[in-house]
Image: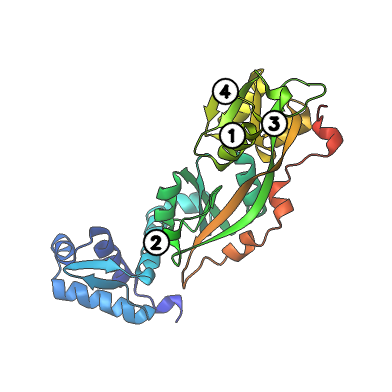
Amino acid sequence: MNVEQINFHHLRYFWAVAKEGNLTRTAARLRVAQSALSSQIQQLEGELGEALFQRQGRRLVLTEAGQIALAYAEEIFATGSQLLSTLEHGRHPDQTLRIGAVATLSRNFQESFVRPLLGRADLRLRLESGVFADLLLRLEGHAIDLVLANRPTGREWSGRLRCRRIARQPVSVVGSRRLRGFRFPRSLVDVPMILPGRESDIRSEFDALCEQVGVKLRVLAEVDDMATMRLLARDTQALALVPSVVVRDELREGVLYEHWVVPALFETFYAITAERRFQHPLLKTVLAQEEQDLLEARPKRRGSKRSG
C-alpha cells in the first residue's frame, strides 16, 4: 500500500470519531448518517489492513493501530491547517520523536541523550517532563515514544512496558569550597548537607551507610529536583550528595569540588518503551548509544579538583 491509496476523507472521519469517542454523536455533529460514517471507517480499516476500533460494551475503544493512526492524523491535520505558515518559513514535513523525562532527572543527562539527534534535518524532537506514573500512562497510550527515568518500572507494568538500564553514574559529595583532608565519616560531622528527597534510592542507601558508621547528618535541605540541587550546591557553603553528571560542568570549571566518591552508590538511568508492533524507527538508534557517551560526566582527575 502507498500513500495514494489512503483516502484522507475517511481518515478525517476516523479522526473525528476517535476524538469524540462516540459514533452517534460524531455523526450528528458532522450531519451524516451513522451508517455512512461507520462505512467510511470500515473502508479506511480496509485500506490500512488493520482494525482501528474495538467494541467494549457500547463504547468504541481504539486498538493499538487506532492509537497510532490517531497520532498521525493529529499531525496530518495540524500540518494541513498550518500550510501557509509552513511554506512561508521554508519548513518541510519531518518525523517527531516524543520523549518524556521524569521531572527530577538530571538535565545534563537528558542533553547527552538527545544530542546525537539534534543535527538531523528530518527529525523534530518533542521533549516534556512529568511525574513518573503519568509518563508511563502516556507511554502506554502512545502519547510519547520513550520515557527517561532514574527508577525502573514496577511489576504491574511487566509485559506491557520494557525497561532497560542505559547508564550508571557514581554519586559524590561535592561543595563550593576546597576542603583539605576530607575523610568519611568524620568530615560529615555537624556539616550542613543538601540531600535528595527521602523517596530517592540514593538517599536511602546513603542514610543506611551513615547509620552504619554512627554519623547523624545535619540536613540543610532535601531536594528532589537535580537542577535545584546543583544551584544550591554552587551558591551555598553546604555539602551536597549528587550524581556526578548533575554537576558535570561545575566540576570541570572548578566551581564545585568533588570531595568523596561514595563507594558502591550510583544513580541509574533507564529507558522505558512500550511493547508495540509499530515501534518508532529511531528508537533503535537512540537506545544503541554507548553508556560512556551518554554520561560524559566524569572529568579527568586533575580537572575535577578533588580535594583531599
Residue matched to label 2: 71
Q: Earlier in the sequence, mark 4 or mark 1?
A: 1
Residue 173: mark: 3
Residue matched to label 1: 207
Q: Nearer the viewer, mark 4 or mark 1?
A: 1
Q: Nearer the viewer, residue 78 or 99?
A: 99
Q: Earlier in the sequence, mark 1 or mark 2?
A: 2
Q: Nearer the viewer, mark 2 or mark 3?
A: 3
Q: For the residues marked 4 and 1, what is the alpha-carbon distance in whole angstroms?
A: 11 Å
Residue type indicated by callout 3: Val
Horizontal and vertical percent position of residue 160? 44, 65
Query: Taking 289 as reference, is 132 above or below it?
Result: above
The C terminus lies in which quarter of the figure?
Answer: top right
Residue matched to label 4: 219
Name the element at disc 1: helix
Residue type indicated by callout 4: Val
Residue positioned 52% across, 65% down in the render: 280
Residue 260 left/right relative to 272: right
Q: For the residues marked 1 and 3, what is the alpha-carbon distance in whole angstroms?
A: 13 Å
The N terminus lies in which quarter of the figure?
Answer: bottom left
Q: For the residues marked 2 and 3, what is the alpha-carbon distance in whole angstroms?
A: 45 Å
Number of labels in the image equals 4
Q: For the residues marked 4 and 2, what is the alpha-carbon distance in whole angstroms?
A: 47 Å
Q: Nearer the viewer, mark 4 or mark 2?
A: 4
Q: Nearer the viewer, mark 1 or mark 2?
A: 1
